Image: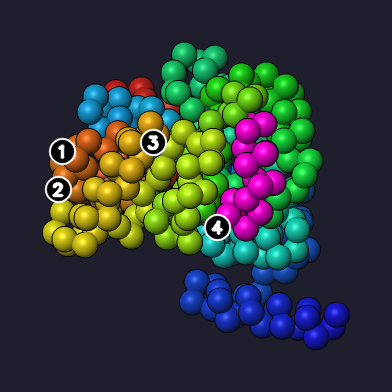
């Protein structure tokens, strides 16, 4: 056990050295962060490419470390996954995002859904569906205002079990999106059995979509695949008009990215809405 522990610490030191110097994030720091309100959600708007209207918000977690400032999720989500803290962290994110969506609904800022990212391990926990149902009841948010983003790999690993859970979630009214589509080991035969509503085209295919023939071919295929399966399709990481124009032209339904907005605090979203920018 000692050996494993040491390896784990070394792994994180190496993985994070670029962003955090010699700082080592430890399990206890993360546990304290969850308990002491050091986590924060930002929201990135998603737009309908044809009507330019705001259709959703993706919740993205940050860690406001008292000494280290804002820490990006790729620097602590892996640690949370490894230690199992992801279950607690994930519940915190779900509750916070649902509460915020409830506030927006009550304020009349209609937005179809808030999307929450799920880690594989969080999704695998068998009590997940029940805990989510409890959160929705506690927050009094109708399930149709929540969307969950899951990756191909996380559902492929335990396909039968995952499909069962996805059906339960759909049954509750929660909608499901496959995140980073095209980067995992997709199996089209499984895709057909997943009860999902949306595919999100990974940013790596979007950055050069207007200029690179291969990226264009892949993005076009994903758009067509989604539509042939009666799914909505969202492009992630849209940074310029050229990409947006290309996607609109190919019939992509929605877009998300710096062209429209960086991830904003909830208050930032309110200010943006009031400024009439959406
Ligand atoms: P993701 O789900 O693919 O989220 C999109 C990431 O792309 C976000 O990074 C977002 O800030 C960034 N992004 C958005 N638009 C653009 C753009 O136009 N250009 C570029 N270059 N980047 C853009 P972020 O917030 O650092 O999140 C990184 C990843 O961390 C997410 O990738 C997701 O996998 C994970 N994550 C974030 N929040 C949560 C969470 O609450 N739970 C779990 N399990 N994972 C999360
Ligand atoms: Ca996502
Ligand atoms: Ca993504
Ligand atoms: Ca991604």
Residue under label 4: 153
Nearer to us: label 4 or label 3: 3
Q: Which of these two is toward me, 66 or 200?
A: 200
Residue 242 got which mark?
2
The reply to whether dot 2 and dot 4 touch (C-beta < 8 Å) is: no
Q: Which of these two is toward me, 271 or 147?
A: 147
| Residue that protrudes farthest toward the right in the picture | 1
Nearer to us: label 2 or label 3: 3
Task: Look at the magenta stretch and give its main secondary structure.
Answer: helix
Q: Earlier in the sequence, mark 2 or mark 4?
A: 4
Q: Quadrant of the C terminus?
A: top left
Residue 69: x %, y % from top left: 55, 59
Query: Disc 3 versus disc 1: distance between alpha carbons?
Result: 20 Å
**In the figure, 227 relative to 236: above or below?**
above
Q: Quadrant of residue 110 in the image? A: top left
Residue under label 1: 249
Query: Disc 1 versus disc 2: distance between alpha carbons?
Result: 11 Å
Residue drawn at x 22%, y 28% as measured from the top left: 50
């Amino acid at each position: 056990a000692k050996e494993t522990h040491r390896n784990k610490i070394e792994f994180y030191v190496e993985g994070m050295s670029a962003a955090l110097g010699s700082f080592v994030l430890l399990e206890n720091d993360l546990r304290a962060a969850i308990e002491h309100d050091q986590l924060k959600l930002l929201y990135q708007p998603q737009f309908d490419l044809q009507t330019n209207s705001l259709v959703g918000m993706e919740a993205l977690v940050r860690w406001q470390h008292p000494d280290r400032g804002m820490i990006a999720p790729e620097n602590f989500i892996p640690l949370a996954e490894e230690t199992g803290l992801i279950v607690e962290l994930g519940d915190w994110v779900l509750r916070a995002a649902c509460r915020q969506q409830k506030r927006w609904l009550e304020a009349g800022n209609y937005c179809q859904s808030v999307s929450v990212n799920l880690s594989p391990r969080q999704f695998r926990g068998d009590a997940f569906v029940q805990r989510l149902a409890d959160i929705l009841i506690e927050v009094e948010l109708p399930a149709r205002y929540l969307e969950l983003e899951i990756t191909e790999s996380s559902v492929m690993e335990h396909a039968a079990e995952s499909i069962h859970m996805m059906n339960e979630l759909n049954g509750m009214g929660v909608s499901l999106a496959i995140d980073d589509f095209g980067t995992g080991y997709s199996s089209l035969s499984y895709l057909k059995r997943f009860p999902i509503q949306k595919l999100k085209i990974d940013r790596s295919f979007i950055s050069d979509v207007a200029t690179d023939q291969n990226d264009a071919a892949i993005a076009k295929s994903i758009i067509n695949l989604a539509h042939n399966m009666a799914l909505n399709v969202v492009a992630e990481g849209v940074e310029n008009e050229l990409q947006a124009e290309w996607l609109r032209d190919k019939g992509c339904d929605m877009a998300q990215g710096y062209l429209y907005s960086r991830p904003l605090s909830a208050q930032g979203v309110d200010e943006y809405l009031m400024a009439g920018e959406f």
